[in-house]
Amino acid sequence: MFIMCNMINRKITNNIVEGLNNFRVVLLNGPRQSGKTTLVKKIADDVGMEYVTLDDPEKLELAINDPKNFLEFYGASPIAIDEIQFAPQLIPYIKIKVDKDTRKGHFLLTGSADFMKMHQVTESLAGRMVRYNLYPLANAEIRNKELNIIDQLFDNKINRAQNTMSFEKVLDAVIQGGYPEIYFMQPKQRSQWFDSYTDSRIQKDILEYRTISASKLREIKTLLKLLATYNSDMLNFNNLAKRLQMSNKTIQTYVELLESMYIVKTIPSYHVNESLKVIKSPKLHFVDTGLASHLLNLDKENLLLKKDGVYGGMIENFVFSELLKQSTYSDNNVMIHHYRDLRKKEVDFVLENRNGKIIGIEVKAKASIKARELKPMLELSKESKNNFQAGFIFYGGDEIRPISVEKQLFYCLPLGLLV
């Protein structure tokens, strides 16, 4: 069964190959177990690159202690180097090599931490490298859907006859998440996998990324579980600091670290200009709803019983996760924001493309939507004026339908379109 999962076509593949045709260095970042190694091995094989992984202790030792000769031996011809974050010592020598040999597609690098946050990488490879992110599987990849939902929204090409999954399938997708290795596992095995995954990421990977004491690792694990209860909420460092009896600065450092490891993601607020009266705090989401569900001890049955905000937060996080994943291969290069003004009028997501055009997206788990619930979307459309292109609300119903608010038309879309 796992072999079947490995055969799922990753939609970002063509982008990476195109990057190799146009840049000397291509970097593929993303969380561990998102499928980077499988994808990079396939691409390396297809384009004739050698593949080396720094998970190999002997190769890693050489890369750290003698990076120049490592590249002389392994990097004479185009090469894919997996888990490059373990040996940042290679970066200056990669720069030297690609400055001397300017052929395209010389290096395909992967990293399980946000390598671009490392100053020497940004400085050394600027203008020489293009970067892509690979997240766990999008449902569009699992079901091999041809159309990208972000492009459909910007092009206003949502088809009324488009196939949509039941809301029950949506809940299954929320609980399961998208990590390839667990896709065919039963709930008990998935839970065991997530336990191991969480421990490994915190106890092993963070230590390799930054020098941190054992007591601080325990603090990070405690914070991670607490963050799951704040999923899809405004990120308030003061509240978190009080709950955990830590300083604001410590909480902020830990959140940044978890974000650099692709476990959580903060999304900034949207504002047309600096004078706009909006709340500028970021919102917090988990990259994978399966991991968030595990941290909250949720299954489909008890998720439905949660009426304290957890239920709505998980559904919203699911939409965010699918948008994030599909944004990596959409034709529209988008930034994902949220919107909330001082009167607490809130729009869950604002997608902004490179031309400044925006799409508003609200998320409601219920099956019936009232026009008054789209007043915040209307406010966003007025504030952003000509930049506002369209507004949509993903909801628990089973049909695509329009809804008018003050003679402005918005569209209700079944959450099942994302499954």
Image (spheres, rainbow, N blue to C red):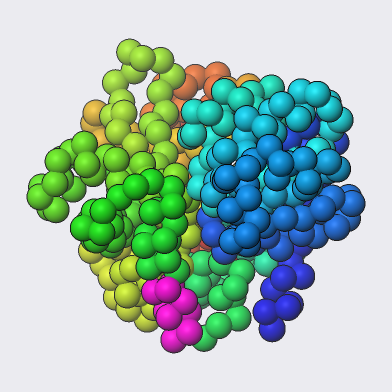
The residue sitting at 56% across, 75% down in the picture is 182
Depth check: give the residue in front, 86 or 159: 86
Instruction: Name the side, left or right, on which 248 lies relative to 6.
Output: left
Q: Where residue 373 sits: x, y (%)?
A: 36, 45
Above or below, 155 against 146 in this view is above
Quarter where residue 352 is shown? top right
Extent of the magenta region: 187-196
Residue 190 falls within the magenta-colored stretch: yes
Magenta region, main secondary structure: helix
Instruction: Name the side, left or right, on which 228 lies relative to 262.
Output: left
Residue 106 visible somewhere in the drawing: yes
Depth check: give the residue in front, 263 or 37: 37
Q: Where residue 147 sits: x, y (%)?
A: 74, 52
The residue sitting at 44% across, 57% down in the picture is 205
Q: Where residue 54 sits: x, y (%)?
A: 62, 55
Image quarter in which the C terminus is found: bottom right
Q: Where residue 261 sits: x, y (%)?
A: 45, 50
Image quarter in which the N terminus is found: bottom right
The residue sitting at 83% across, 41% down in the picture is 76
The residue sitting at 47% across, 50% down in the picture is 262
Residue 171 visible somewhere in the drawing: no
Above or below, 204 against 320 in this view is below
Residue 350 falls within the magenta-colored stretch: no
